């Protein structure tokens, strides 16, 4: 399948991404001070008034050693009404607080005549590189990530919530990719953004090639089982049930990169559709949805799998070697050796360059 | 079935409850200032080292217009490793932050060699009485609720997280009750604590009597659909699956008080067992569990239903009339009229007094 | 809320019900011969071509000691494409075979160019009264129940799949009820049909009155924990998610009749909406759904709860004393004593007569 | 990881497999007569009295366009008490009937003093090769599959329930594989048996090599989206929750063979542990379980993924070209060309022979 023009989640019309990257200090851990290698990433389903024009959404969990707040509510109303935020584990509370601050500022009726807000914040653990005990992501950082979110190209690798993440014991973090369906399948666009922090080296597959076994050095001194948060966006008109099924295909894309979903991994997926709106206005008795028929879901399923697989690989290939707390270093996947491994396994066309 | 000596969740040996009640200011809403009618409640499954000696636990949702953070993780490891916190909706982030602060202080290895923390915080919406936009529950309040949690009698009604809650359009809040099984059924103790903030007046049943239709006045000027958080504790040895089934019976107890579980209600239940321990220590390959056989679960199911029903009614009968923001008043269920209604419907023995 | 003209699931326009009642032999059990006290009940969502014009549907389980085949498929496509059949536990295979026979006859392309069929058959255990080992419900009986299903009044009590069922240790079986929403809530109709085979005597509540404790005699010599299957139909336009939430309210209705959902009970609910169609035709890329907005679901939730509660009571009040295998007798709930109990508990208006 | 001595599910001590293969007739479809290309496969968790000594079990669904009866009950009691049967879609009823017949014969108290039976039968659709409308698998065939189930080597490919199945548009069917954990990880054995009937040619991966794109010919004239049933057995002591998590890893193994889990596929997994017993005897109040600690699950997760991946490939490599109804032909994956493709993609060691 063909990627969209940006090969990013922002190929889905209206979707916005904002990163705040926090990187300061070197050397020995001084809890509360640093080194800081963390951040926050915001994803907005559209540029309009999401609170009043919600989008159908669903969550799906492959392995749940992780957190995505708001998931109970999303799977009850079948819709998303707040920006999606990604950050590190122990910062979830502060980032929720930031979402609340943002919403209170924007909606003066919330908590008075209007409903109260339940933020959607998902996390991975960056404590190998980052002073996680320092809780360096503030509510203000969160508001900034939301307010600076924009359409257009998405920075990948060691940025935003991905700043301190590791995947397959290489440097990981933010990755994104997209697919455009052929016109006969509706011509829909589907985009994925991941925060990749999971996997063990020996399991890494790139397009089926056992790259992790080919590049067995460049290992970090320390590493813990991490997680992956996957956000799937599409303009295909879907409802909660079909989005939940679509989310499960993102897990297939993840599996294609080699991991078996370790116990310690929170493999949590959120999918939303910009092809329908769910009104906040309580007055109308009913509203209308359009949904892609089951017989036509397979191209979307494939797109979700392919885009997730590629988004994870993009996180790996775009991330740069990062040294964090106590000198812990996560090495970037070396592109020359990746190309070499690909060629060894029958992909002579392989060629890659980090920008 | 017979209640325990305290008729409280603390009848389950080791369980501790702590409340921090925030109540200040009167009159017109000045967002950020008050009036404040809110708080935070902590429930600790045992007095030992919960992080290292986890308890089996499970969550179950009847209607999910609400939040209980940590639920994905609890239902993955089938265990609970952190105190349970209850508060108001938009304060969840700050209370999570408080749990993190408490854990970091207590466990210096968290986030360095040890795992990171995912707090369990559940909410109801107290914005009718409280300046919810003011986010008055701080991380420090949270730590205080945890640190002052104690065995013994549990304050009910307009205390802790229940300070600003309303149930059946009366004043609601914290309620608790317990049941002790007969020796032939194992002699186990089961206790329930609720934060009751749900229900419409006309639906209220007390022991089957349509009290809500009998007392149709004393209505609040404003009210929104609220939620109920139910925590079930037992010393019966259970595992995740049986606890999940037990949690579902708390919903039956709730149904017996008359509500149909409105769309706007987050009816979220967490059940844990102190009769088993799940070790944090990663070294041993296996551990042992004892579980009550399915053929003997019914008395526990009944206990969960009965104790939940009574805990909700205790919240109503123990709460006192509360006036909050903009003069909004939630009236206490008048005990004399409750007795009168009970007598009218064939319960001549009824007699009740607020302490 | 007001019942529909028939106070039956058939008040939902298009819904059809068919019963085949099998009742022969008396006295001592001769496995394979009798006594036979069993049957099969068919529910058709509409009178058209259900295979080609499916209806949105969802299942929900409170306690799963039971079976509803096809539930995985229903909750994947979010729709129902075959008649719903109720029968006894060990006859599920034969009744599935009957559904297949019916479908093969009607659709000559099934299994050749068209899809294959996955029947929806749900069961309760009638082995106290019935020669369950005899497997007396045949594929032909099943086809007959489907083919004779009709609109109009629905026989209740000891008929069809309810012939040998017991509820609250009285004679139970088939019950039905309906509710019509006020025009301001959309004027929708919701109907429920149950096969009631669950509950212990002492738990029985009728409109909150502890009838089970008031009528403690007339107990069966033998009884096992049974199950209840609840089918909820509505013409309100809903989708899978909202139907699943609606189904959960049927469990609330069941709870209002007093049971705590015993371990041995399969409390399984299927809800469908005739207010939308899901096309079988694989050609169109998309289709449209209309759904009731969340803010307007509460009247439907209440209707599902009320109609389920009443359908169970109707099963009890319409069933007649039945003696089955080995002289086991399930007594009918005595209406005069029910009225007496109701009056004792403040319902002076109570009056009931079995037709 | 190392396979067990048989590289089969029967490497798990006690597990038994029985096939009844039905193959007769050629040429044009005469519904009810043939050609017959179908069968039934039985899997018994142990050779003892499964009804009285149940094994912990759990089901998990990736995509649910399929059926596994009994799954609601398995996931309620967290245990399996009946043989597992695999067959074709429209034969599920008759095979359930066969399980009931087998159980009634063996347990004269079932349905009298003892509980009734809920069979576990899972299906795939073999209607491209088989006269599916003929419903050729009888109750007697089912009893025979159960009664002839044995330890030792397991026939693979076009046998038993796999007789008429197709995978990746090659001939598919039954496949099995196993893994033995190193002593440091407990030395447990895990075995998988699949009935592989899913996938589109172009998606087929073998150890990451795009074999499906390399062998684009040998396509069937007709094919429909099929399903895969995966049964995971292990002697590692696990409970319901950990088995459910283990089952999810079988889906990862499936994903590694290339499919994205098409809409039309029922990807349904059942996992059981022979390392614990759940007693049927209702007398003891409690029973004990041993469980592998979460920190030690990863080797089991990997084993489940690897064994599932290999079991699917074994189904493909062991199946033989089969011509069925109307001359429809499913070609065997040609081993020489498979080896060639493997070599082209950097696996010079590849060598395979069909026995």
Image (cartoon, coloured by chain):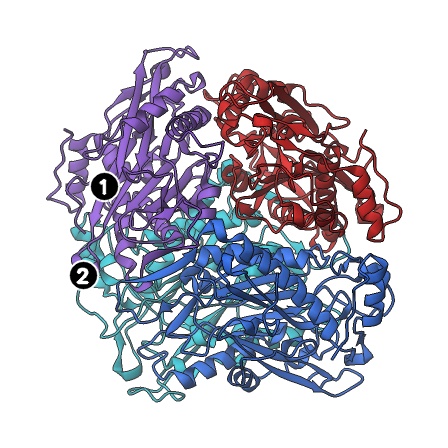
Chain colours: A cyan, B blue, C red, D purple
Residue B221 appears in the figure: no
Dot 1: chain letter: D
Neighbour tally class for label 1: few under 14, some 14-19, many 20 plus, Cα within 10 Å: many
Residue B328 drawn at (x, y percent) = 80, 76
Is label 2 in contact with label 1 (beta carbons under 8 Å)? no
Question: Label for residue D177?
Answer: 1
Residue C341 drawn at (x, y percent) = 80, 47
Residue B126 image-quadrant placement? bottom right
Residue B142 drawn at (x, y percent) = 55, 82
Residue A99 drawn at (x, y percent) = 57, 73
Q: Nearer the viewer, residue D307 or D10?
A: D10
Q: Secondary structure at mark 2?
A: helix
Disc count in the image? 2
Neighbour tally class for label 2: few under 14, some 14-19, many 20 plus, Cα within 10 Å: few
User: In the visual, does B130 lie left or right of D330?
Assistant: right
Q: Nearer the viewer, residue C329 or C170?
A: C329
- Residue holding disc 2: D184
């Amino acid at each position: 399948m063909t990627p969209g023009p940006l090969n990013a989640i922002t190929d889905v019309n209206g979707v916005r991404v904002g990163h705040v990257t926090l990187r300061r200090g070197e050397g020995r851990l001084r809890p509360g001070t640093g080194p800081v290698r963390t951040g926050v990433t915001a994803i907005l389903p559209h540029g309009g008034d999401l609170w009043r024009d919600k989008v159908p959404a669903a969550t799906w969990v492959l392995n749940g050693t992780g957190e995505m707040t708001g998931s109970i509510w999303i799977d009850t109303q079948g819709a998303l009404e707040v920006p999606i935020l990604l950050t590190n584990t122990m910062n979830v509370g502060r980032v929720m607080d930031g979402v609340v601050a943002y919403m209170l500022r924007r909606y003066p009726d919330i908590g008075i005549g209007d409903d109260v807000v339940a933020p959607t914040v998902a996390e991975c653990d960056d404590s190998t590189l980052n002073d996680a005990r320092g809780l360096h992501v503030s509510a203000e950082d969160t508001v900034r990530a939301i307010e600076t979110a924009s359409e257009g190209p998405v920075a990948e690798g060691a940025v935003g919530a991905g700043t301190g993440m590791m995947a397959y014991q290489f440097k990981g973090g933010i990755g994104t990719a997209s697919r455009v369906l052929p016109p006969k399948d509706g011509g829909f666009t589907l985009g994925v953004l991941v925060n990749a922090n999971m996997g063990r080296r020996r399991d890494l597959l790139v397009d089926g090639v056992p790259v992790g076994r080919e590049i067995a050095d460049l290992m970090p001194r320390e590493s813990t089982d991490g997680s992956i948060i996957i956000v799937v966006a599409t303009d295909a008109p879907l409802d909660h049930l079909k989005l939940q099924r679509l989310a499960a295909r993102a897990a297939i894309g993840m599996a294609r990169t080699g991991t078996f979903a370790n116990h310690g991994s929170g493999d949590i997926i959120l999918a939303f559709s910009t092809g329908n709106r769910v009104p906040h206005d309580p007055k109308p008795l009913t509203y209308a949805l359009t949904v892609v028929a089951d017989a036509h879901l397979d191209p979307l399923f494939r797109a979700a799998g392919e885009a997730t697989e590629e988004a994870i690989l993009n996180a790996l290939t775009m991330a740069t070697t990062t040294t964090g707390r106590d000198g812990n270093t996560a090495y970037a996947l070396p592109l020359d050796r990746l190309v070499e491994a690909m060629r060894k396994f029958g992909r002579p066309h392989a060629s890659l360059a980090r920008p």
